[in-house]
Amino acid sequence: MQYFTYTGIKFIDTCLSILVRYWPSLFLGIKTTLLISLTGTLIGLLIGLVIGGLRAITVEEAAHPLLKISKKIYDLLSRTYIEVFRGTPMMVQGVFIYYFLKPALQWTPVIAGIFIISINTGSYMAEIIRSGIQSVDKGQSEAARSLGMSAMQTMIHVILPQGIKNAFPAMGNEFIVNIKDSSVLNAISVTELYFQSNSIAGSLYKFRETFFVTACVYLFLTSCTSVILHKIEKHLNHTKTSYPASQTTADTMAMNKEEV
C-alpha cells in the first residue's frame, strides 16, 4: 500500500513539474491547436453551407432540362466529395494532400493543416446542414413559395436560418472533434499540442507523465468549449424568430372545408 501511495505521489509531482517547466511549449501547442481547429471548423462550415444548401434544393419538374442535368451532376460530385472525405482517415488525407500539393504551393504545415481540417470538416458539415434543413417543417417552404419567393430565396431567407439553428448541436460537436483530431496533423510536422507533448516526452523519457498532462489539457479545452457551446445553444433556443408557424389548427381546417 505504501508503495502505491509513494508511486502515486511521485507521479503527480512529476506531472506538475512537467506542466510548470514546459508550460511555454504546451501553451504554444494549445494556441496552434485552437487556431487550426477553430479556423478549419469555420471554413468547413462555409463549405458545408454551400454544399449542403445546394444539395437540399429541389429542382421542379417544369424546370429547364439543362438545369436538371446540372443538378444531377452537382449531386454526383458533392456526394463523391462527401463519401471520400468521410470514408478515409484524416491522417491519411493530411499526409497525401500535404506532400502532393507542397511542390506547387510551397505551403507551411500550419496552412496545410487548416486546409486539411477545412475540407474534411466541410464533408461532415454538408451532411449536418442537409439534415438540419430537412428537419424544417415543409409548411415553411410552402408558405414562402406562396408569397412569390423563388426556391433559392426560400432556402437562403427562410429554410437555411432555421436549419442552422436545428443543426447547431452537431456543428458544435464537430468543433470539439476537431480540437482532438488536430493531433493527427503531427504527421506533417504541425507544432500543435500533441507534437509539443511528444517532443517533451522524448527529451525526458517520461511518456506516462507527459501524456497524462496532455490528456488533462485536451480535456480542459473540450470541457470549456462544451460549456460555451451549450450557452450559445440555450441562447438560440430562447431567441424568438419572426418565421410563421406552419401548424394547421382545427379551426383553419374547418374554414378551408367551408370555402371548398
Image (spheres, rainbow, N blue to C red):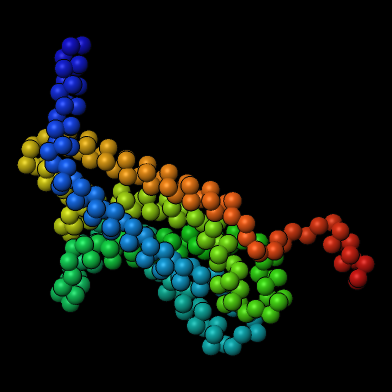
Residue 150 visible in the displayed image:
yes
- Left or right: where 195 falls relative to 156: left
Q: Position of residue 179 (x, y in %)?
A: 32, 51
Residue 131 visible in the displayed image:
no
- Left or right: where 59 falls relative to 254: left
Q: Residue furthest left?
A: 203
Residue at 16 percent of width and 14 percent of height: 3
Residue at 59 percent of width and 55 percent of height: 239
- Residue nearest the viewer, comparing 79 with 177: 177
Q: Position of residue 8 (x, y in %)?
A: 20, 22
Q: Quadrant of residue 60?
A: bottom right
Residue at 20 percent of width and 72 percent of height: 101
Q: Position of residue 72 (x, y in %)?
A: 50, 78
Q: Which quadrant of the rendered structure holds the N terminus?
A: top left
Q: Residue furthest right?
A: 258
Q: Is residue 111 above or below residue 210?
A: below
Q: Which quadrant of the rendered structure holds the C terminus?
A: bottom right
Q: Is residue 75 above or below residue 91?
A: below
Q: Residue furthest top?
A: 1
- Left or right: where 222 falls relative to 29: right
- Tell me how many marks there are: 0
Q: Is residue 8 above or below residue 99?
A: above
Q: Quadrant of residue 157?
A: bottom right
Residue at 9 percent of width and 42 percent of height: 202
